[in-house]
Image: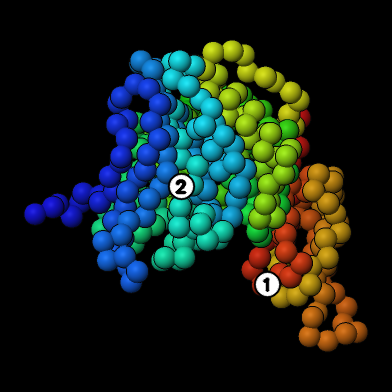
Amino acid sequence: MKDLSDNPISATVDFNRDGVQHGFLKLPYSRDDSAWGAVMIPLSVIKRGNGPTALLTGGNHGDEYEGPVALSKLAQGLGAQEVSGRVIIIPFMNTPAFHAGRRTSPIDKGNLNRSFPGKPDGTVTEKIADYFRRTLLPLADIVLDIHSGGRTLDFLPFAACHVLPDKQQQAQCEAGMQAFNAPFSMRMLELDAGAMYDTAAEQQGKIFVTTELGGGGSSNARSVAIAERGVRNLLVHAGILEGKVELQATVMLDMPDGSCFVASEHDGLLEMCRDLGDRVRKGEVVARIHDIKRTGVAPVEYRAGRSGVLAARHFPGLVQCGDTVAVIADVLS
């Protein structure tokens, strides 16, 4: 009898074989239209000899596209002869959410980036999280998870790391972030980090770098170019690819505490009063929310809780109570 602690996901590739392999993580999933069906998560493994392993992921949220585009192109073009070590590429990490163009899975409503450590006998999303935590992350030395704002947020394009208890590990993550070399680099504060992929990787001592490269539920030529160059820079930094890290100017940002977040306490029509990248002063109006049930009502003003740069904003024109309207980051350099 199969041990219930065993994850049902199986790989159609051999992670230890040299060469280029394209295959799937196969997750059995019985459903109305396929009693013995499966969720098929595409992946590529490019390996040559001994060396560090990079685990590269996109599509953790299914409405974010820079990672899927950049990593799909990398999987098409990267040859084993270019690599010293191993590169594991998973462009559509939460494949059901990606196919639906949604942040969360249409199967179980699971937000993969809030589902760790996962469960081998849990929902589809929990099984994916468990497989990453117990099978893929232990293989990796350096982990890159490419995000953007999806349909509901828009960001300045930045690579990010977190403040960690282990300062040596934090320094390694910061070095990876700097090597990715996005136009902005962020020490990022997470409001709900406990069940995140980031935290699972960091708890295993991995060098972990993430990004926010735009938003609005699409990508553009500039944001994809930032992702592509950043991925190659990080692989060079890790010693997996030969060459030099291509460095351009980056602005260092910090999110030291919760005052960076401006959250709505109303439903209504959003009027942004400042644009991404604008410098703002503490107390300055950054957004107004207008009543959509009647005319002649003054809008509610939302003000910056600190001085800095507008690093993120709510994207759709309508907002709900509880939505983050704006994020203001400190400028360090």
x, y percentage for residue 71? 54, 36
Q: Which residue is mark 1?
A: 320
x, y percentage for residue 117? 36, 50
* Residue 55 seen: yes
Nearest to N terminus: mark 2 or mark 1: 2
**Which residue sits at x=56%, y=59%?**
101
- Relative height, residue 138 to residue 300 (above, below): above
Q: Under tag 2, what secondary structure?
A: loop
Mark carried by residue 131: none
Give the quarter of the figure containing the N terminus: bottom left
x, y percentage for residue 50? 35, 16
Which residue is at the front of the view, 92 or 79?
A: 79
**Which residue sits at x=52%, y=32%?**
76
Which residue is at the front of the view, 242 or 181?
A: 242
x, y percentage for residue 288? 83, 67
**Which residue sits at x=83%, y=51%?**
275
Give the quarter of the figure containing the C terminus: top right
The kind of residue on which mark 1 rests is Gln
| 190 displayed left or right of 325 | left
* Residue 302 placement: quadrant: bottom right
**Outermost residue, bottom direction?**
294
The kind of residue on which mark 2 rests is Met
Mark carried by residue 93: 2
| Cα gap from disc 2 to disc 1, whole angstroms | 28 Å
- Label 2, residues with CA under 10 Å away: few <14, some 14-19, many ≥20: many
Q: Under tag 1, what secondary structure?
A: loop
* Residue 253 seen: no
State the colouring used for the structure image. rainbow
| 29 displayed left or right of 22 | left
Q: Are marks 2 and 1 in contact (CB under 8 Å)?
A: no
**Outermost residue, right direction?**
296
